[in-house]
Image: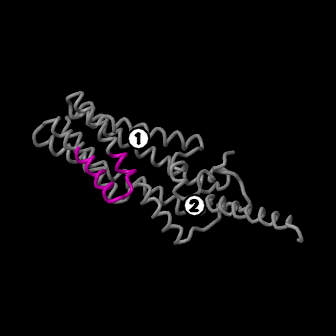
């Protein structure tokens, strides 16, 4: 048992706990932030959309790749100047950068899409396997967002079940998506592949996030281990102060 899921005095919420409207709203807000929200989604889609648009018009792989890479970098710079959160932008620019490198190296527009497709399949497999072995990846990812870390593993079985269902949903949705895309990669043309990729960028993600919200909103509330640790620290400090006061002369 790790320090992230150590048992303390508060009892975990049982499976019979009824989620409140506040809990549903908190879950929705946390998921919205965790997955980047509308702005993060737009920033993720824009470089790929620009690549496929330019390539559709002039079939110039180099120009398309450079334009997509430049836009991805520009989005990060804008976030840095505005002092916004850059984690989603940085992950996006890294993915675009790898795609640009593949496209320029291979001289093929399909090379731009291949790294992201391989990564997506890997995620689908990881989500599925993690759910099947009882250590759902989504719980690892979202635990810190809900300030529960890994406490759901041993102290909150209802949330572990919800994370397992959600991880399995993500895995199956990702695998279904790339079961459609890889035949196009092998036998379709680059332009067709690009537009289908753009069309399938958002709907599967929205569906996976919806299932995640559905399962977590009905699950018991998270155990705030951060709050517990802070309470323990305050109690320890108070106990030390009391012991020190008791040792003072005249008391």
- Expressed as whole percent of the image width and height from the top left, the position of residue 229 reads 66, 58
**Secondary structure mostly taken by the magenta-highlighted segment of the chain:** helix
With respect to residue 208, does 63 lie above or below? above
With respect to residue 147, does 172 lie above or below? above
- Front-most of 113 and 69? 69
Mark 1 surroundings: few (<14), some (14-19) or many (≥20) residues within 10 A: many
Q: Mark 1–mark 2 contact, CB under 8 Å?
A: no
Quarter the C terminus occupies = bottom right
Which dot marks residue 219? 2
- Front-most of 127 and 242? 242
In which image quadrant can residue 119 be found? top left
Q: Secondary structure at mark 2?
A: loop
- Front-most of 227 and 199? 227
Name the residue that disc number 1 marks: 175
With respect to residue 65, does 144 lie above or below? below
Whether residue 90 is in magenta: the answer is: yes
- Magenta range: 70-92
Task: Please name the residue shown 41% across and 54% down the image.
Answer: 35
- Expressed as whole percent of the image width and height from the top left, the position of residue 26 reads 50, 66
């Amino acid at each position: 048992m790790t320090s992230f899921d150590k048992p303390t005095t508060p009892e975990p919420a049982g499976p019979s706990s009824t989620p409140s409207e506040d809990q549903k709203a908190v879950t929705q807000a946390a998921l919205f932030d965790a997955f980047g929200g509308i702005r993060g989604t737009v920033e993720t889609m824009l470089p790929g959309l620009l690549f496929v648009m330019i390539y559709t018009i002039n079939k110039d792989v180099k120009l398309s790749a450079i334009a997509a890479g430049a836009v991805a970098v520009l989005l990060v710079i804008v976030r840095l100047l505005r002092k916004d959160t850059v984690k989603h932008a940085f992950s996006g620019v890294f993915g675009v950068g790898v795609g640009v490198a593949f496209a320029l190296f291979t001289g093929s527009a399909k090379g731009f899409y291949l790294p992201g497709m391989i990564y997506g399949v890997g995620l689908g497999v990881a989500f599925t396997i993690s759910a099947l072995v009882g250590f759902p990846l989504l719980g690892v990812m979202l635990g810190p967002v809900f300030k529960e870390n890994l406490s759901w593993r041993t102290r909150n079985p209802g949330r572990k079940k919800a994370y397992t269902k959600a991880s399995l949903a993500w895995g199956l949705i990702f695998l279904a998506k790339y079961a459609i895309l890889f035949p196009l990669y092998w036998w379709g043309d680059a332009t067709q592949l690009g537009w289908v990729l753009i069309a399938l960028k958002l709907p599967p993600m929205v569906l996976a996030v919806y299932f995640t919200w559905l399962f977590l909103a009905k699950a018991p509330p998270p155990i705030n281990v951060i709050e517990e640790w802070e309470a323990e620290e305050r109690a320890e400090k108070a106990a030390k102060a009391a012991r020190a006061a008791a040792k003072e002369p005249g008391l």
